[in-house]
Image: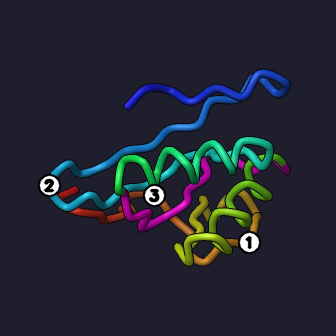
Amino acid sequence: LPQLFEASSCTYTYVVADAGTRDAVIIDPVLETVPRDLRLLRELGLTVRYAANTHCHADHVTGTGALRRALGCPSAISRASGASADVLLGEGDELRFGAF
């Protein structure tokens, strides 16, 4: 899937999906683009298994929270970030979805 760009913060969001199961992970979602992201996910028929952040910035955390509320998916971030999430990841941990 293509990179998704939010111009005002110059932030990229990514969706990684398993074409067979339609399971997906959305990475670094931004609050301002949640409507766009929800529309894309619905158009593609994807089920989001995790909303994950690669780092802790307010735009990502609030975007993740909005997707979590809209989709019921757990949030994930590195334990070392100091941020709160449903899944706190450490070195070597994996987020499993579909065949990945």
Q: Amino acid at mark 1?
A: Ser
Mark 2: secondary structure: loop
Residue 29: percent from left, percent from top:
65, 47
Quarter where residue 15 is shown: top left
Q: Residue at x 50, y 26 (%)?
A: 3
Q: Amino acid at mark 2?
A: Gly
Q: Residue at x 57, y 65 (%)?
A: 76
Total tally of numbered discs in the picture: 3
Quarter where residue 30 is shown: top right
* Quadrant position of the C terminus in the picture: bottom left
Q: Amino acid at mark 3?
A: Glu
Q: Residue at x 42, y 48 (%)?
A: 43
**Left or right side of 30 for 22:** left
Mark 1 or 2 closer to N-term? 2
Q: Which residues are magenta?
A: 46-58
Residue marked by disc 2:
20
**Left or right side of 85 for 39:** left
**Left or right side of 12 for 48:** left
Residue 31 in the magenta stretch? The answer is no
Residue marked by disc 3:
91
The answer to whether residue 81 is above or below residue 29 is below
Mark 3 or 1 closer to N-term? 1
Label 3 neighbourhood size at 10 Å, few (<14), some (14-19), many (20+)?
Answer: few
The answer to whether residue 48 is above or below residue 14 is below
Q: Residue 84 — which label?
A: 1
Residue 50 in the magenta stretch? The answer is yes
In contact (CB < 8 Å): disc 3 and disc 2 = no
Mark 3 or 2 closer to N-term? 2
Residue 82: percent from left, percent from top:
76, 64
Quarter where residue 85 is shown: bottom right
**Nearest to the observer: residue 55 or residue 62:** 62
Label 2 neighbourhood size at 10 Å, few (<14), some (14-19), many (20+)?
Answer: few
